[in-house]
Image (cartoon, rainbow, N blue to C red):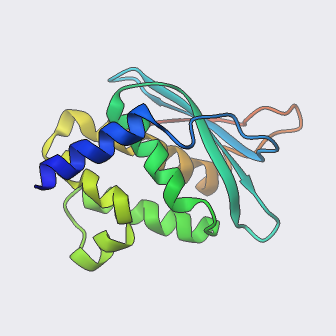
Amino acid sequence: MQNSFYNEILTDHNLHPAHKDKIEGANYTLEGVNPTCGDDIILSLRVDDNGIIQDGGFVGDGCAISQASADIMLDLIIGKSKEEAQHLSDLFLRMIRGKVTEAEKEELEEAGALEDISHMPARVKCAVLGWHTMDEMFTDGAGRIGPDGKPTGTATTEDQ
């Protein structure tokens, strides 16, 4: 049953992504690269002055897992504060490593369906690409849009 649910969610978000689009007025943008698989996304967020993520989107190419995971992440974080988004990212990354409680997994809603990726080591970097990119964007300020209108850095999953 779990595997069927996982496949259904993955397929739906890959074939019909709700957030695969450029975002007008984004004030955070960062490229995320998974050199192992060739996944390459540009994550963009519009965050208001109170730190609430008002909108988000991504563009780029990659495997079904990286694309679906980024779309699921955006479903979950839009409307949340940067701190809440980082908390969810921490839960997701711990879930992928098999170190999350059932209650914590419930906080991840649909993203919890990707838990089985922890048993597929070659796919872990694919699943965490969007999440890792968002973390880098907020933690290091690498995703802040510079005076030239371009992002100030690139996130990579090499250090995962």
x, y percent for residue 36 = 33, 24
Residue 118, visible in the rendered structure: no
Q: Quadrant of the C terminus?
A: top left
Residue pictured at 53% horizontal, 30% vertical? 41
Nearest the camera: 125 or 63?
63
- Give the residue drawn at x 49%, y 39%: 17
Q: How many marks?
A: 0
Quadrant in which residue 105 is drawn: bottom left
The x, y position of residue 121, in whole percent, is: 18, 39
Q: Nearer the viewer, residue 16 or 94?
A: 16
| Residue 147 occupies quadrant | top right
What residue is shown at x 47% (from left), y 52% (from top)? 73
Residue at image x 31%, y 47%? 9
Percent coordinates x, y for residue 115 in the rendering: 23, 55
Location of the N terminus (image quadrant) = bottom left
In this view, 95 is above or below 43: below
Above-or-below relation of 46 to 66: below
Q: Quadrant of residue 111?
A: bottom left
Residue 3 lies, in percent from the top left, at: 14, 48
In-image side of 134 versus 159 (left or right): right
Left or right of residue 121, residue 111 in this image: right
| View extreme (right): residue | 147
Above or below, 100 relative to 54: below
The answer to whether one can see residue 72 in this image is: yes
